[in-house]
Amino acid sequence: MEPAPDETGELPMRLTTRIETLGTESAFEVAAAARRLESEGRDIVHLEIGEPGIPTPAHIVEAGVRALHDGATGYTLPAGLPELRAAIAETVTARGIPAQVENVVVTSGAKPMLHYTVLALAEPGDEVLVPDPGFPIYESVVRLAGAVPVPYPLDLSGDEAVTAAALAARITPRTRLLVLNSPHNPTGTAISARELDAIAELVCAHDLAVLSDEVYAQLRFTGTHESIATRPGLAARTVLVDSFSKTYAMTGWRLGYGVMPARLAERVATLVVNNTSCTPPFVQRAGLAALTGPQHHIGELVATLRARRDALVRGLGAIDGITCATPPAAFYAFADVRELLAASGLTTQALATQLLERYDTATLAGTAFGAQGDGYLRLSFATSAARIDAALARIARCARELSAACSPQ
């Protein structure tokens, strides 16, 4: 007999500890709340979600559609189509990281690769260094694997957001894996070549592995991207994670990959078998077209994003109580609103909530990315210039009204 529902109508299922501790990505929750308001007729400016703000280039879409018509709808190799893996290996080699087909595993987005890497490299009870503020899924998958996330702080006031010294202070005999994200979400900062050298020495000295999330590698406004995997001895210690979502505007296609030592790639492919079996082949065909087809849209996207960035940062800086550094990469501004919070008595989350519910502007509280994000808002500038202007006007009005409400009469 099936168990009878309880008085609430729910089946008497006991959830596991691991699922209860699983975190989430607040951008999706805020986006859902914003869409509910839009369904009521509200005009919401979306600065919360991390999407490039352009359609997938036509030749990529055409390749995916053609693959569907050609019957690319069955199972394929768990590690990915050999031709796509070869194109990825060639792309990574051009970044200075020699790779072959056997080093590449294709996944349905970058997130599964984050999970697989932690499952493969961290035992229950092992410590994993994760950035704070940082992409919340890092900590979430570490906990799900039974390992212990150890946050390391970013210096949000200086040029070097991530330093070897900050990492060294948190390494213990139980540390097994270091998560790096450069260019970084949510701050848009990047790790300098000097610090990468120092971090690489630290990794080797403590016999660590590295998960290097580089999904924003091609969205840089200043300098050129460098990977820790290019440092001596680090390719053998690194899982490089990348995605087609940001560079090729393929967020909904769900296509990512990892590049790693061949022996590890074999085991990660087994994890794919146990999870999704494979990545849809028509999506992989689209990814192949992305890598081997025209690339001019990337330069155009970066130029557009730079103009949007400059407008947003300039506008935020003109609002009393808000300061904002100019990010050198990605498409996020990490605005410092601590002065405004101090004057208004609001928490970071309360301010983000007010901006959405009263001023029709969706942002993310910095606390969604860790404790060190308190006092900051993440704003995506991957939207139109007109929408950025509208958001700035609304944020400025919010700041004025908060200041007026708190001023002595």
Image (tube, rainbow, N blue to C red):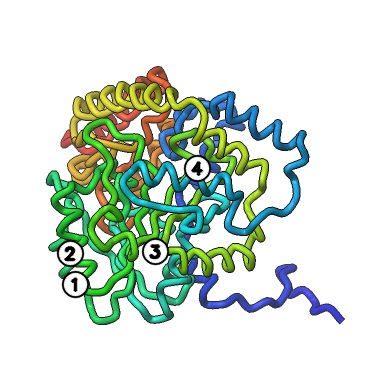
Q: Secondary structure at mark 2?
A: helix
Q: Neighbour class for label 3 at 10 Å: few (<14), some, many (≥20)?
A: many
Sequence-first tag of 3 and 1: 3
User: Is residue 7 depicted above or below 282 in this figure?
Assistant: below
The residue that mark 3 highlights is: 139
The residue that mark 2 highlights is: 201
The reply to whether discs 1 and 2 touch (Cβ–Cβ < 8 Å) is yes
Q: Neighbour class for label 1 at 10 Å: few (<14), some, many (≥20)?
A: few
> Which mark is in front, 2 or 4?
4
Res. 290 mark: none
Q: Amino acid at mark 4?
A: Ala
Q: Amino acid at mark 3?
A: Glu
The reply to whether discs 3 and 1 touch (Cβ–Cβ < 8 Å) is no
Q: Amino acid at mark 2?
A: Glu
Image point (33%, 41%), residue name: 378
Image point (58%, 40%), residue name: 252
The reply to whether discs 4 and 3 touch (Cβ–Cβ < 8 Å) is no
In front of the other: 94 or 13: 94
Sequence-first tag of 1 and 4: 4
Sequence-first tag of 4 and 3: 4
Task: Calculate the distance from the C-alpha at mark 2 to the C-alpha at mark 4.
Answer: 30 Å
The reply to whether discs 2 and 4 touch (Cβ–Cβ < 8 Å) is no
Q: Left or right? Give the position of 384 relative to 210.
A: right
The residue that mark 1 highlights is: 205
> Which mark is in front, 3 or 1?
1
Q: Neighbour class for label 4 at 10 Å: few (<14), some, many (≥20)?
A: many
Res. 87 mark: 4
Q: Secondary structure at mark 4?
A: helix
> Which mark is in front, 4 or 3?
4
User: Is residue 133 depicted above or below 390 in this figure?
Assistant: below
Q: Amino acid at mark 1?
A: Ala
Task: Calculate the distance from the C-alpha at mark 4 to the C-alpha at mark 3.
Answer: 31 Å
